[in-house]
Image (spheres, helix red, strand yellow):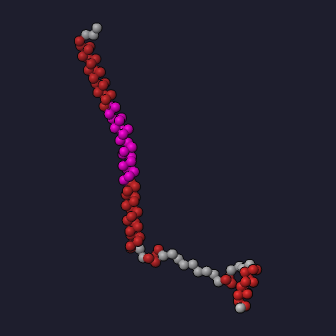
Amino acid sequence: MLAPGQTAGETETRRKASAFMNNLTASVSLLVLGFPVTTGSIRAAVFSWALIAIAIMRFVWMHFVPQGCLAPTTTTHAPINDLKLTSLEREAQQIVSWR
């Protein structure tokens, strides 16, 4: 049998241990549930800021950069005489120039 003093002490110890375990369980569950939410929200914020930055850069490039800077360059083709021609191509060129 337990003395009344021991029963009160044991009950108080179990109550403190039970409260500690409940607090620990709540903390771990918040960590487990909150961790993916936190990383997901941070990732969403980073992606959204990246998209905003890209939209601003496109706006600046489309409206404030002179069009000559973005225009494609034209290539000049070498005259036919400068190219190395095969014998069939030379014959075809002579026939065309003969007419």
Where is residue 74 shown, x and y percent of the image?
54, 78
Q: Quadrant of the C terminus?
A: bottom right
Q: Please identify the residue farthest to the front as the structure is shown.
A: 99
Residue 4 on the magenta span: no
Q: Is residue 42 magenta?
A: yes
Looking at the picture, tell me which residue is in the foreground, 3 or 49. 49
> Given the current orientation, which residue lies at the most extreme top position?
1
Q: Where in the figure is residue 26, as x and y percent of width and height?
A: 32, 33
Instruction: Work out whether 98 lies above or below 86.
Output: below
Spot occupied by residue 53 in the image (x, y as percentages of width and height): 38, 62
Q: Quadrant of the N terminus?
A: top left
Q: Is residue 89 left or right of residue 29?
A: right
Residue 85 lies, with reference to residue 16, above or below; the image says below
**Which of the 4 quarters of the picture holds residue 36?**
top left
Who's the residue at 35% across and 41% down the image? 34
Q: Which segment is the magenta one?
A: 24-45
Q: Quadrant of residue 14?
A: top left
66 left or right of 73?
Answer: left
Q: Main secondary structure of the magenta part?
A: helix
Left or right, 64 with respect to 88, comes to: left
